[in-house]
């Protein structure tokens, strides 16, 4: 029997080096995460501050956006996919527990409801709010003009006399809002005596408020205001009609985005060329909030704002004999002594008194409204208890 030789043994294939073990992907931290911010929202002021506040909203599946304008019954909201028309008065809004009426500048959560369209279902907690008492004398309610403003620009046109009392009122509202107040003097080329008006404005503005002189014709002061907007700040322009707010906005943006109108020579008043409060993106960074001319600006909870505006009076008042001195007829009043010596202008003290009298009257109206509401709640409660008493005929 023949013997076949065994085939030669094949060499073992070389061993492949072991693959290094891939590290596990990092796990996101627990808790709600801020949504990503596309460039569109960054242009409207999105930053880490906004992202952190969005995590406070318990609204799953929402889309972030910012209210660019408020119209009757709806809002124009800027989102990553473009502007959308959204309503805060839908069933979806009520189901989400929305209890804040959105204002221009608010950061909001929107969702597309299949039955009612795009709905606002959440408003991010505000870091500032420009508010006044509703001008309607029949009601005592707060009216929020704008939200999440970083810089409050009190705009005054130099083609007319500087109304110091009006500036002090607007500064009081600005300090109370939580925004940084600045005074912007427009139409510098039309000032009768620019140096005198600027000195007067600085005396009224007081410590901590910068005064900026601007001119639409020469471009003076525009770059300074653009710097206040960087990198993602919002600057609101507030002032009477004809003060040059829309022209100022066009100058900062670099193109005509807001219409402008002439000023009447008889009384120096302008027409309301701006009729809504609008957010306007600035190409160099930041956002402007243009507002219509204000016919009135009644105070709302403005005690701290008045104190900041009249810091010079508050400083002198530390020398009064009585802590609750009203600087009217009390003995040993350091403030009235300062007026008598010429250290404090009588007009400024009268403006201080006027705003405090307005706040005192507002407090009385708020207390009366609270009493009426408490009486109505008590009446409803007693009626509900009466319905629950045993033995009543419920047929």
Image (cartoon, rainbow, N blue to C red):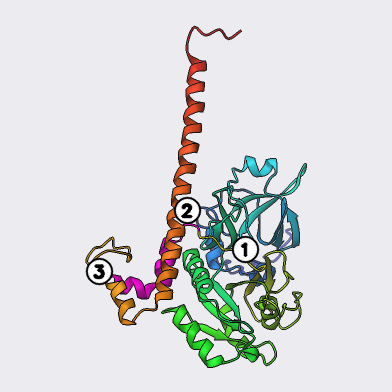
Identify which residue, 107 or 329, lies in the foreground: 329
Q: Position of residue 94 (x, y in %)?
A: 64, 41
Label 1 CA crowd tier, 10 Å (few <14, some 14–19, many 20+): many
Q: Position of residue 8 (x, y in %)?
A: 69, 66
Identify which residue, 100 or 121, lies in the foreground: 100
Ranked by sequence position, the earlier of labels 3 and 1 is: 1
Question: Is 80 covered by the magenta stretch?
Answer: no
How much space separates mark 3 and mark 1, taking CA atoms?
Answer: 42 Å
Ranked by sequence position, the earlier of labels 3 and 2 is: 3
The quadrant the C terminus occupies is top right
Q: Which residue is under mark 2?
A: 362
How much space separates mark 1 and mark 2, taking CA atoms?
Answer: 27 Å
Q: Which residue is rendered at x = 24% and y = 72% of the image?
A: 319
Q: Position of residue 32 (x, y in %)?
A: 54, 53
Q: Which residue is under mark 3?
A: 320
Ranked by sequence position, the earlier of labels 1 and 2 is: 1
Q: Position of residue 378 (x, y in %)?
A: 46, 29
């Amino acid at each position: 029997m023949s013997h076949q030789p065994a085939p030669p043994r094949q060499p073992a294939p070389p061993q492949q080096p072991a693959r290094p073990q891939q590290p596990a992907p990092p796990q996101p931290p627990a808790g709600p995460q801020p949504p990503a911010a596309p460039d569109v929202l960054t242009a409207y002021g999105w930053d880490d501050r906004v992202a952190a506040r969005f995590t406070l909203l318990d609204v799953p599946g929402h889309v972030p956006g910012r209210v660019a304008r408020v119209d009757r019954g709806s809002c124009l909201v800027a989102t990553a996919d473009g502007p959308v028309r959204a309503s805060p008065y839908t069933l979806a809004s009520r189901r989400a527990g929305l209890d804040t009426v959105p204002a221009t500048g608010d950061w909001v959560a929107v969702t597309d409801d299949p039955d009612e369209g795009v709905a606002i279902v959440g408003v991010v907690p505000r870091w500032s709010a420009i508010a006044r008492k509703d001008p309607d004398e029949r009601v005592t309610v707060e009216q929020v003009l704008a939200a999440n403003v970083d810089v409050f620009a009190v705009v005054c046109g130099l083609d007319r006399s500087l109304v110091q009392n009006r500036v002090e009122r607007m500064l009081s509202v600005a300090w109370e809002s939580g925004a940084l107040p600045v005074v912007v003097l427009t139409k510098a080329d039309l000032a009768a005596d620019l140096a005198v008006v600027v000195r007067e404005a600085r005396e009224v503005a007081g410590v901590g408020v910068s005064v900026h002189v601007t001119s639409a014709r020469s471009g003076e002061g525009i770059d300074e205001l653009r710097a206040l907007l960087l990198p993602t700040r919002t600057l609101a322009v507030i002032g009477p009609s004809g003060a040059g707010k829309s022209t100022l906005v066009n100058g900062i943006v670099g193109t005509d985005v807001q219409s402008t109108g002439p000023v009447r020579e008889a009384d120096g008043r302008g027409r309301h060329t701006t009729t809504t409060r609008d957010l306007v993106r600035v190409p160099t960074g930041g956002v402007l909030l243009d507002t219509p001319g204000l016919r009135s600006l009644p105070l709302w909870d403005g005690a701290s704002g008045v104190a900041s505006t009249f810091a010079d009076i508050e400083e002198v008042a530390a020398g009064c004999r009585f802590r609750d001195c009203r600087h009217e007829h009390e003995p040993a009043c350091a403030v009235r002594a300062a007026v008598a010596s010429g250290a404090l202008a009588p007009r400024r003290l009268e403006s201080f008194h006027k705003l405090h009298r307005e706040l005192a009257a507002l407090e009385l109206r708020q207390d009366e409204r609270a009493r009426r509401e408490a009486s109505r709640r008590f009446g409803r409660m007693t009626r509900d208890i009466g319905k629950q008493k045993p033995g009543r005929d419920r047929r």
